Amino acid sequence: MTQIQMLGPAASNTVAGYELSEREREQLVALTRRLTGPGHPLIDSSEWLGAALAASSLMPRTLLATLRAFRHDPGRDGVLLLRNLPVVAGDPLPPTPSVPHSVERVPTTAASVITSLMLQLGEVISFRSEKNGALVQNVVPVPGREESQSNAGSVLLELHVENAFHDNRPDYVGLLCIREDPTGDAKLCTSSVRRALPLLSEEARRVLAEPRFLTEPPPSFGGLDSVRSAHPVLLGDPEDPNVLVDFAATHPLDDPAKAAMAELRDAFVETMTAHRLRVGDFAVVDNRVAVHGRTSFVPRYDGADRWLERVYAHLDNRRSRVDRKGGGAVLD
Ligand SMILES: O=C(O)CCC(=O)C(=O)O
Ligand SMILES: [Fe+2]
């Protein structure tokens, strides 16, 4: 029972997944009641996070075992898909927000569920320059931002490692679907370096492992002024490397580097999985092994658009301590 099972083609992909039983779902609802409702501190407070951490260790055993197994080995795809998670309990879901930098501050069922899950993978973190440092962020289309290469946009979002420019980027990106795209066109796309690597030429592998690439931070992080030093795209063991690339923000420094990056993108596209997330689906991307992006779609801005909640986690809280002023969850 605790083994990660494979979801079949009917689920539009074959990544590691687990569907909660009704009983497990009820258990989660009961657990989130400890965290939601009037009188509870706001999400980003240390009081609420402490309560969420305590509650998270009481999640159903199968869920805990599934998360632990994924942390041990993210599999060929570097993605874990959980289904049938509760996102509301009682009250109807409000309209999908459409303002920039939308976040959750008051603890809801969905926010409690995603935070608890991520707390069992690692330590939850956020970045001060991104969505005001809020831990639970809304991924929603925003009017006027259609063309932007961010999660507020609706044009194709290029495959990327999350916050690739940052030394303490997240190890995991968790995305919980709380309202599915009514058009069905918006799909989370994921590709892993484990699947792409065998498709690459020897030359591309060699060049990608050299520091011949620069990754730009988004403008909110200081833009080009804060570009760090040149880095390789493939890091670590050449047989099973980590990947560090954002096809909208990483710049090759010479022609062979450009060709190798193009080869890598082709390999990612060839081995990509598209996930049409439904309400209660939760995708966790291992940000070292997998890249993610999103297909284009047409938002209506009528309150019924696609709505995901996002939480980051990383594994080494000591390593990031230098960036977490005061010891909280927010990185500078
Ligand atoms: O909208 C999506 O499916 C993914 C967006 C994304 O890349 C993110 O929120 O980090
Ligand atoms: Fe992303």
Image (cartoon, helix red, strand yellow):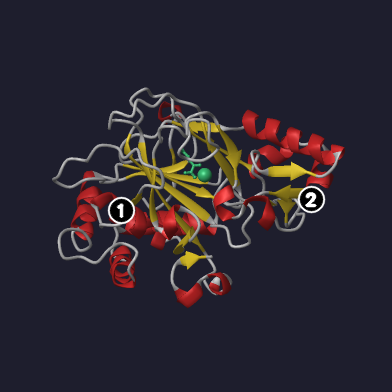
The answer to whether residue 162 is visible is no
Q: Residue 145 placed where, x, y %?
A: 47, 34
Label 2 sits on a secondary structure element that is loop
The answer to whether residue 26 is visible is yes
Q: Residues within 10 Å of mark 2 (few under 14, many from 20)?
A: many
Q: Which mark is nearer the camera, 2 or 1?
A: 1
CA–CA distance in space, label 2 to label 1: 38 Å
Q: Residue 177 placed where, x, y %?
A: 35, 40
Q: Quadrant of residue 261?
A: top right
Ligand 2 within 8 angstroms of badge 2 C-beta:
no
Front-lying residue, 168 or 153: 153
Q: Residue 269 placed where, x, y %?
A: 63, 30
User: At 24% across and 53% down in the image, what residue appears?
Assistant: 108
Label 1 sits on a secondary structure element that is helix
Residue 60 against residue 256 in the figure, above or below: below
- Tell me the kind of residue under disc 2: Ala
Residue 14 against residue 121 in the figure, above or below: above
User: At 48% across and 51% down in the image, what residue appears?
Assistant: 173
User: At 28% across and 69% down in the image, what residue appears?
Assistant: 51
Front-lying residue, 306 or 271: 306
